[in-house]
């Protein structure tokens, strides 16, 4: 079995306390997790095998939402502080895991992405409706994690997920998905987000592009000629002749 997580444990020394570090890299549950009792149990055993605070480094495009939900629950249930550090990307299911951090820090060049859950379904209309209802329930459960961390309204979070929203570190701090942008140890502590932040919405970009295409495709028809008003010169001459006689 290929694990998507890796532990690095550093024993306590005279100058430094014991340190536990968990790395989550690549696709979450790339080979095994769903409908599998072995993998979740193994992760939990390794998590609980040590004591003290832990640091979780995340660089993942996401993956299985069931695995993400279980890891989130395990980290939330861990009896010590969990510091999450996003050094590359925490997208989709990985963003859910990040919400379990007591504190969430992001590299200044990292990204966080949230979107609606997806699945593959086949069958008749009844089966399709079941899939839709299942996805709706999964979305509600994901919003729970985002809401606890950010304090944003469920409606706001739902709109951000609908739009497939990408956030840089500054925007993630601004919206409450992260607590701080990582800095060099020697830098002066400053938890204020940068003045310029970036939020990218796939839906907004697509809509803007479609509007521009529609504008380009409009037919440049010439303006209609104005109809002459009043009487023609011929009519005036006829009127004068009648007046003469």
Image: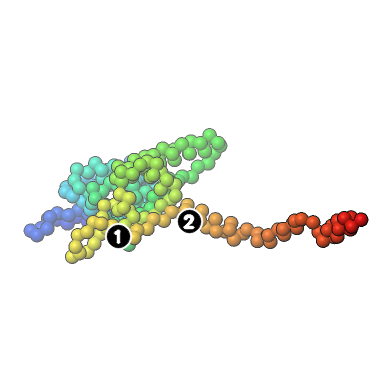
- Is 128 placed above or below 229 here? above
Percent x, y of residue 1: 34, 51
Residue drawn 48% across and 36% down?
A: 130
Percent x, y of residue 148: 30, 42
Residue drawn 12% across and 55% down?
A: 17
Disc number at residue 169? none
| SS of the residue under disc 1 | loop
Percent x, y of residue 158: 41, 43
For disc 2, the neighbor class at 10 Å (few under 14, some 14 to 19, many from 20) is few
Q: Nearer the viewer, residue 230 or 75?
A: 230
Disc number at residue 205? 2
Query: Which residue ends up furthest to the top in the rendered image?
Result: 126
Cα–Cα gap, marks 2 and 1: 23 Å
Q: Which residue is mark 1?
A: 194
**The C terminus: image quadrant:** bottom right
Any part of residue 242 in sight = yes
Any part of residue 25 in sight = no
| SS of the residue under disc 2 | helix
């Amino acid at each position: 079995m290929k694990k998507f997580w890796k532990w690095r444990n550093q024993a306590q020394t005279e100058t430094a306390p014991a340190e536990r570090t968990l790395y989550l890299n690549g696709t979450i549950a790339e080979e095994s997790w769903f409908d599998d009792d072995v993998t979740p149990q193994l992760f939990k055993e390794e998590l609980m095998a040590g004591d003290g605070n832990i640091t979780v480094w995340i660089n993942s495009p996401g993956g299985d939402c069931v695995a993400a939900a279980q890891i989130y629950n395990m980290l939330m249930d861990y009896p010590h502080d969990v510091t999450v550090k996003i050094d590359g990307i925490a997208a989709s299911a990985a963003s859910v895991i990040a919400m379990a951090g007591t504190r969430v820090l992001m590299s200044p060049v990292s990204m966080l992405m949230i979107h609606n859950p997806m699945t593959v379904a086949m069958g008749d209309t009844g089966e399709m409706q079941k899939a839709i209802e299942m996805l709706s329930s999964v979305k509600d459960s994901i919003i729970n994690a985002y809401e606890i961390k950010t304090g944003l309204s469920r409606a706001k979070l739902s709109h951000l997920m609908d739009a497939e929203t990408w956030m840089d570190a500054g925007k993630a701090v601004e919206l409450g998905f992260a607590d701080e942008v990582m800095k060099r140890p020697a830098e002066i502590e400053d938890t204020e987000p940068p003045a310029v932040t970036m939020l990218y919405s796939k839906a907004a970009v697509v809509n803007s592009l479609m509007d521009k295409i529609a504008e380009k495709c409009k037919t440049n028809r010439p303006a209609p000629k104005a109809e002459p008003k009043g009487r023609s010169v011929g009519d005036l001459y006829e009127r004068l002749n009648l007046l003469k006689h």
